Image: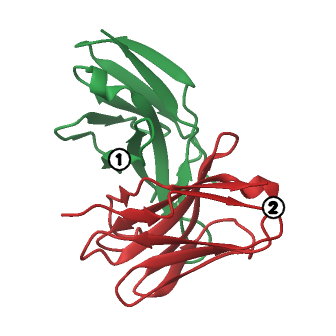
Amino acid sequence: DAKTTQPNSMESNEEEPVHLPCNHSTISGTDYIHWYRQLPSQGPEYVIHGLTSNVNNRMASLAIAEDRKSSTLILHRATLRDAAVYYCILRGRSGGSNYKLTFGKGTLLTVNP
Amino acid sequence: KAGVTQTPRYLIKTRGQQVTLSCSPISGHRSVSWYQQTPGQGLQFLFEYFSETQRNKGNFPGRFSGRQFSNSRSEMNVSTLELGDSALYLCASSLETVETYNEQFFGPGTRLTVL
């Protein structure tokens, strides 16, 4: 099964860009890459997703390596509200017709004022 | 629009008992997925229900089961509870099955403690 690897923690200063990396060297050609974040005492919240091309939305940007073995979530200007655990997730088939979502351990992002 | 709601929010059980957790999805959402979150294993996908049928399944033993009703509300049942089942159980809903739809909306979770 495909796996994702993320740093345990990262630190940033407010209003600076943040680059959160994720390694998924065993990703299959049809796996989508998703990012969710989880604020304290809350359920995860969708951030962004992509397949092959870089993606932008109002929350963040997703940069996907050409070989798709890694990706980077980019927060352009971190705010204190962005402090959370960020999960890199692969969504794809896992044998037969069964779909599977594989979560990384997550990166705890601390934002300093 | 109301978000995903889960009941109860906290639950304490003893080994060997069984437990039923409930999830009400966002109105109009047809897919409900369940996840287990523990400090050691992180977030793990349990299963997805779509249109009252189990659509996808993670790698959990048969003690973990679920069902979905015609109004899309879902229940998850864990039988013969073990200490290792202590976890935060999260429910997520989406408009369509996770196979085709990209954004899931999570509830706040049910914190299950097994003594």
> Residue at image x 31%, y 27%?
A82
User: What kind of residue is marked 1?
Assistant: Glu
Question: In the rendered picture, chain B carries what hue?
Answer: red
Residue under numbered circle 2: B82
Q: Quadrant of the C terminus of chain B?
A: bottom right
A73 in relation to B95, above or below: above
Residue B25 in picture, x, y percent from top left: 35, 70
Question: In the rendered picture, chain A carries what hue?
Answer: green
Q: Nearer the viewer, residue A109 or A58?
A: A109
Q: Quick check: marks 1 and 2 in contact, CB under 8 Å?
A: no
User: What kind of residue is marked 2?
Assistant: Glu
Which label lies toward us, 1 or 2? 2
Q: Nearer the viewer, residue A30 or A62?
A: A62
In the drawing, does residue A80 fall left or right of residue B82?
left
> Residue at image x 52%, y 77%?
B75
Residue under numbered circle 1: A45
Q: Quadrant of the N terminus of chain B?
A: bottom left
Labels 1 and 2 share a subunit: no
Gap between marks 1 and 2 measured at Cα:
29 Å
Residue B57 in picture, x, y percent from top left: 59, 72
Q: Residues within 10 Å of mark 1 (few under 14, many from 20)?
A: some
A82 in relation to B61, above or below: above
Callout 2: helix, strand or loop? loop
Which chain does the residue under circle 1 lie in? A
Q: Nearer the viewer, residue A104 or B13?
A: B13
B15 in relation to A106, above or below: below
> Residue at image x 46%, y 56%?
A31
In the rendered image, which quarter is residue A60 located in?
A: top left
Callout 1: helix, strand or loop? strand
Q: Residues within 10 Å of mark 2 (few under 14, many from 20)?
A: some
Which chain does the residue under circle 2 lie in? B
In the drawing, does residue A51 fall left or right of residue A25?
left
